[in-house]
Every structure is written in C-alpha cells, then in structure tokens.
Image (cartoon, rainbow, N blue to C red):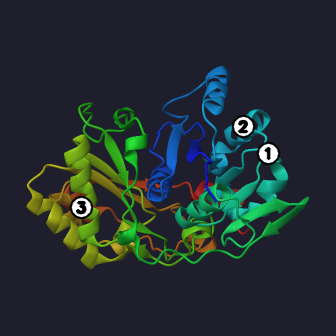
Amino acid sequence: MVLTKNKDVLLIYPSYSFPRKSPPIGLAYLAAYIEMDGFDPYVVDFNISPMNDDVFSQLLRSKKWLMVGISFMTNQYADASRLSSTIKKILPSVPLIVGGPHPSSIPERTLKDLPAIDIVVKGEGEITLRDLAMALWSDNSIDAIPGICFRKNGTIISNSRRELITDLDALPFPGWKYFDVAKYNIFSLTGSKDSPVFALLSSRGCPNFCTFCDSHTIFSRKFNPRSAGNIFHEIMHLHNTYGMMEFDFVDDLVTVNKKRVLELCRLLSDSGIDFRWMANARVNTVDREMLNAMKNAGCTRVDFGVESGDPHVRKVIRKNITNDQISPHDCQRCWIIYRKFHYGWQSGRNPGISQNDGRTA
C-alpha cells in the first residue's frame, strides 16, 4: 500500500492572562520528537503570535492537516475551548487532540466539557503523540495506544497510562526552530534585548506531595533528571545557534540532587561564558555550597515556593518545610536574588484552612 497522506501536524498553545509569557517548552519537545519520524509540525503560540478569527481560519485551511493538537493549562481553558470549536467547525474530519496539565488531570471530564475534542493525551506526550500520528497516517486503529482517552461510538474510553520515559537524555532537544524565539526576551534577567531568553527543562517530576500541585498528573512524583552533561550540551547548542545568554530552568524543582547541580555549575563556570539564569528551588534542598556554586555559574535569581508563613497552613497543604528553613540568610550571603511565592493555597478553598489562617499567613 502506498501512503499518500499529508504529514503536517498543527500544534497550538492558547493565550492566557498571566503577564510573564513563558515559551511552551512542552510543545517544543513534541515538535522535535514527531519530526524524527518524518512529520512536519507547525507551532502557534497565541501569546506571542496572536491571530484574529480570519487569520486563524486561513491557517486551518492552508494545509491538509493530519491532526491538530492543543496543549493547555486551566488558565488557558477559555481560549482552548474557543479554538477547539473553531477548529472542529472548519476541519470536522481532522482529529483534534489535547494534552497538558488540565486535560491530563481530568481527561474524561475534558472530553465531556469540550465536545469538539476527539482525544486526550494523558501524561507525557512525546511517544503518545508520535504513536497517534503514525496510526492516523497509516489508517490504523488508535484503540490500543496507551496514554489516551478518546471517543468511540458515543462512548468515552480511557486507556491505561503510558510508562514514563526513563532516559530523558535520549530525547531530542526542544524544537525551538518552530518558534519566533526573538519574541521571548521580554523577561530578560538583565534587561537586555540583544538575545532571546530560553526555557530549559533539566528534569521531570517532583518527589514532594504538595496538595495544590498537579505536576504529578503528567510526570508522577518520581524525580527524573537529565544528566549535567546533556543539559550543558543543550545550553551550548542554544548559545551557538541563537546567541542565547539567558535561560530559565522551568523544572518543578532543580535542586533535588546536589551532585548534579554542582556538576552543571562546574561546566557552566568552566565554559567562560557569562550566562545568566534562574531556577525554582525548595528551601530544604539548598545549602550555602550549592548556592555559591550557582551564583558563580551565573544564577542571579532563585524562586522558592514557600506558600505561607503559617506552619499550620503549610501542614495542611503538605508543604513540609519549617520557618527556620525559610530564612533567606544563605541567599543573601551568596548575593542571589530570591523570591518567596505564596500562591499554593487559598483560604476557603482548601479543607482545614480558615479565613483566619489566611490573615495569619
């Protein structure tokens, strides 16, 4: 049999209201992964490249898309709903697939709430999206593909979750060539507009049990790191290809493994390049040695998720840290800017947390 179907795949990242527009690294990984099997991804980030309805409709009609994918968080739900309705109206026979934190958390509910959606990808998306693309391109059934929830004859079917990718070093680097990377310098750590700021993912998964976080719905609670050498290789690739001088580690928690952090910092310091970068950390995973190494390697900001100054609130949300650990002294001594986030809970929306707790925090 000669296969003549088009291999064009449209991947979409809906808009959201948060002022800091982070590059959608998940879509960049998906694009790079399916490209290895000969598919041709086209990525649209509506936060950086907004389109009115006419322009979007023209894009949908511009090719014979094999499938269309949307990745979204809950704060992108409204735009994802709007876009999915438009897509299904213009391309009724093209499979519409969604993934990301919101659909992965409630896959069946997502299919019920968004009638235009055909398939939900649960968890990590690279292998599952590739398998879906191969099945659709070759006219094979998707019924046995792990990691999906889909409609069939009016019934919602939820397959078993796919096993996590064990060797992240084996993945291709994110496909930033599909993005207008120059537009992502709006959150420069130095205020420079001369080079783009990139998102890097040095690990997947977080071993902690904070009740407000849904990261485990995609990556589980197992910390799955890339090697320091692999991360450094990507950094140098971005520097040599795009002139990157600043980057943001978007991991849930970079600082789980001290040995890995110190090795990466050594590689960055030895490079002789004046990189600037930031990372997310947890107050009970850093010490002065690590922070000094990070500072010397170009780290200028660390964001700590403290969530509350009230030990009772932290206990309720399973944020198992102490007031002593929250002390900023080590950061101050290492001359690293630190920020303490307090957004993991809301009084009245978490069982066991009262309005009075909110005032105390």
Q: Mark 1 or 3 closer to N-term?
A: 1
Question: In front: mark 2 or mark 3?
Answer: 2
- Going by the numbered disc 2, the residue's amino acid type is Ile
Write down the residue under mark 2: 87
Q: Residue at x 48, y 51 (%)?
A: 31
Dot 1 surroundings within 10 Å: few (below 14), some, or many (20 or more)?
many
Write down the residue under mark 3: 233
Q: Would you identify the image quadrant in which residue 137 lies?
A: bottom right
Number of on-image labels:
3
Alpha-carbon span between mark 1 and mark 3: 41 Å
Q: Mark 2 or 3 closer to N-term?
A: 2
Dot 2 surroundings within 10 Å: few (below 14), some, or many (20 or more)?
many
Write down the residue under mark 1: 116
Q: Is residue 229 left or right of residue 137?
A: left
Q: Mark 1 or 2 closer to N-term?
A: 2
> Could you say whether the residue bearing mark 3 is in a helix, strand or loop?
helix
- Along the viewing direction, whichever of 153 and 187 lies nearer the viewer: 153
Quadrant containing the C terminus is: bottom right
Label 2 with label 3: CB-CB less than 8 Å: no
Label 1 with label 2: CB-CB less than 8 Å: yes
Give the number of the disc on residue 329: none
Vertical comparison of 153 with 161: above or below: above
Can residue 294 be seen here? yes
- Going by the numbered disc 1, the residue's amino acid type is Ala
